[in-house]
Image: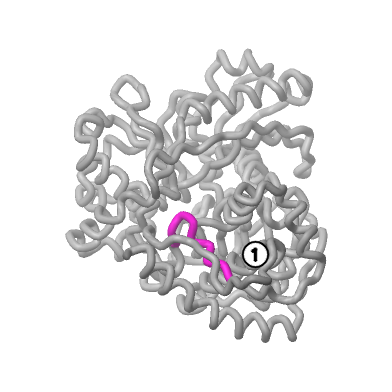
Amino acid sequence: MNTLGIDIGTSSVKIALMGEGDRVIATASRALSVSRPQPGWSEQSAEDWWLAVEQGMDELRAGHASAMREVVAIGLSGQMHGATLLDAEGAVLRPCILWNDGRSGPQCERLTRDWADLHRVTGNLAFPGFTAPKLMWVAEHEPEVFARVAKVLLPKAYVRWRLCGVFAEDMSDASGTLWLDVARRDWSDAALKASGMRRDQMPALVEGNAVSGTLRAEFSRRWGFAKPPVIAGGAGDNAAGAVGLGATGAGDAFVSLGTSGVLWATTASYAPAPQSAVHAFCHALPGTWHQMGVLLSAAASLAWWAGVTGIHESELMAEIGPDPSPSSCWFGPYLNGERTPHNDAAVQGGFAGLNGGSTRADMSLAVLEGVAYAMRDAQQALASAGTVLKEADIIGGGARSPLWCQIMADVLGITLHQVAESDIGCALGAARLARMAAGEPLSAQKKPQRLRSYVPRPARVAQHAERHAHWRKLYPALSGFAKG
């Protein structure tokens, strides 16, 4: 069967048209922009997501009409936590407040102080990136907007509503709102009340591999489907990436070097560890959960450095060379604050150890190492929560760099496997969930081909362990400096 996977990312919308056996028939992508109206704020237009979906689907219809005709199901993946606010008529009330927006720190503190059951029910700390504190911020600073809120939708749920007219969200994405009882896989009325919300303002909950709706007839005609495809519940971006990798069983793990960074471990049961700033969320599949350590600026750090230098990322990598010695300087990748293990929205990034002989290549390598050291922080947080990884797949834009993959393997001390189609992993996972919604069993899903494995080198593992211990002094210095 043919399916479509639509991934609503932060930097782009990607659509993958898939055939049997995960065969990629065609892809389409449209870039997105992020607005930062104040320091620490991050917003995006919901209409931009929809226009990108329309344009991408039109492109696929124009170039692959016969394959599009055979599509039977659509799956959705999306950036998590974003607060898209609709009024009773379905009008968007304000730009979506994104996952890497740090304005709601005071609201997190208040929610933690005033609701004693926060950690027990949600299994997570109150991070500024999560959705509930965003609505508390809107209630306090934009009361006229808050009074009109009829529905709160995460990014992919908004696109789903435009596609099929249904307000629905899957369990993995809902886990990142702080409104879900993660163990029970249901909205928590106590969590909603603690942040001034109501159950009727929430979308219906569905599992990621279940049918959530059917494409509107007018879009089915526009994009040339033989009959309106069903739309799967889908997944938050990381859960979709896990499904794309086949990381659906306990112990399966991956590292994601996307805009943000993620260290993922699938768990057989609900395993909260809020004391370590580790996320404990539902997986996109029934009866499955996962733990996750999150960095707010992974590949985004390299993209930022490329923008500052005016040099393309590939050229910066070429300047470093294929196998350099560790950098003579250091970088803290806290450009948007940090989650695991610090839960600090105010901390800012920075270089340290520069001298008159420091070169651009030294600083570029420090950026790669700084992200890797931050991922080691997340690895140690998961270990403190009882999850010790032996190996993992590696995905995301950063995984295209052999140098960065090897650095990451050396710093984490585990073998990392680069896999096929990792650049569309979330869209691939969404398409797989669509196949399941159309009737294909999970057992028919296969793990993607491993293209190359990066084995940690003992001498470098020991060297980076010492360097990581020294690098950790950066966080308290940068946090203290940011707070004045």
50 relative to 457 in the view: left or right? left
Name the residue carrying label 1.
363
**Quadrant of residue 369 within the rendered picture:** bottom right
Residue 253 percent coordinates (x, y): 62, 65
Give the residues in magenta. 330-338
387 is higher (above) or lower (below) than 318: below
104 relative to 116 in the view: left or right? right
Label 1 crowding class (10 Å Cα cut-off): few <14, some 14-19, many 20+?
A: many
| Residue shown at the point (79%, 41%) measured from the top left | 23
182 is higher (above) or lower (below) than 39: below
Residue 239 percent coordinates (x, y): 55, 52
| Residue shown at the point (63%, 57%) measured from the top left | 257
- 266 or 159, nearer to the observer: 159
| Residue shown at the point (50%, 30%) measured from the top left | 159
218 is higher (above) or lower (below) than 408: above
- 47 or 222, nearer to the observer: 47
| Residue shown at the point (46%, 76%) measured from the top left | 385
> Is label 1 in a helix, a strand or a loop?
helix
19 relative to 85 in the view: left or right? right
Q: Main secondary structure of the magenta part?
A: loop
Mark 1: which amino acid? Answer: Met
Magenta stretch holds residue 109: no
Magenta stretch holds residue 332: yes
Residue 392 percent coordinates (x, y): 67, 67
